[in-house]
Image (tube, rainbow, N blue to C red):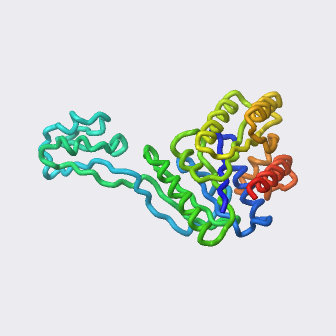
Amino acid sequence: MKQLVILSGKGGTGKTSITAAFAHLAAKGPLAGKVILADADVDAANLELVLQPTLVEQQDFKGGKVAVIDQETCASCGDCQAVCRFDAINYADGLYVVDPIACDGCAACVYQCPTESISMREQIAGQFYFSESRYGPLYHANLLPGQENSGKLVTLVKQRARLQALDENRELVIVDGPPGIGCPVISAVSGADLALVVAEPTVSGVHDMHRALDTLKHFGVRALVVINKADIFPAGADEIEAFCHQQSIETVGRIPFDLTVASAMVAGEAVTAFQPQAPSSIAIRQVWERVSRLLS
């Protein structure tokens, strides 16, 4: 069983559109029935918007603890507010109350409280989902606004996808990874066999591609690069290819700017299924053929 992660140094590069297209192409080829899908962008999950899956399972994700004050035993001394470094404890109407969004879970107030009226309780930080899509099982999740532990939730999504792949002898897990280089990305690339970095030929796109590639190099994950919207700034695309050549990183294709991609997203479909002969569909199909060969 192999794991392919699609990444980008920044958001909006077309990562999810390419992931959805890969899912469609895999389902129509030799890997039909042998692929598991995972959306590891838990802060802004949107792969399900394109695949339109049927929800099978939903469960709460508890990502940390928050302080709670027992008002019946609280002496209203204010020691908890004085020791809180995150301004998470407010005084109103004669009561001290914890703001769960501001609370960092450090438990300093618990140790400071003279009447032991404060305890740490688990909080729901998001939801985890398992769905069936037209192109295979899909694991995805949503982290609630202001919550942390996104890396832990990504690990849960990937772990469940990997376990089903092993149980059912499936050959490939395709992971729609998060943007950036933070904890969610580290969790997404953990155990991956191959990472495809989607880059744009812009100043910020090139800069963030470098960061993504440095992260993959640090964790020993083989990287490939595909250039999206390459025809908007051909000189920038040439710069990306030259850099990758110097670093012995393979570029597996150039995808042109194509409004068909946006139309496919509105229709809730992978662009390769929505309009197979569109310029973007032809380019993505060629990229998939190269990536799948390298995986095998």
Residue 271 seen in the figure:
no
* Residue appearing at x 79%, y 31% in the figure: 242
Residue 254 seen in the figure:
yes
Direction from residue 127 to residue 252 in the image, left or right? right
67 w.r.t. 269: above or below? above
Q: Which percent across, then down, holds residue 47?
A: 64, 54
109 w.r.t. 34: above or below? above
40 w.r.t. 103: above or below? below
Q: Give the camera-side residue of 91 and 239.
A: 239
Q: Give the camera-side residue of 195 and 104.
A: 195
Q: Give the camera-side residue of 213 and 82.
A: 213
Quadrant of the drawing holding the C terminus: bottom right
Q: Which percent across, then down, holds residue 90?
A: 26, 38
Q: Give the camera-side residue of 194 and 95.
A: 194
Res 186 quadrant in image:
top right
Quadrant of the drawing holding the N terminus: bottom right
Q: Which percent across, then down, holds residue 130?
A: 56, 64
* Residue appearing at x 22%, y 35% in the figure: 83
The mark tally for this picture is: 0
Direction from residue 101 to residue 134 in the image, left or right? right
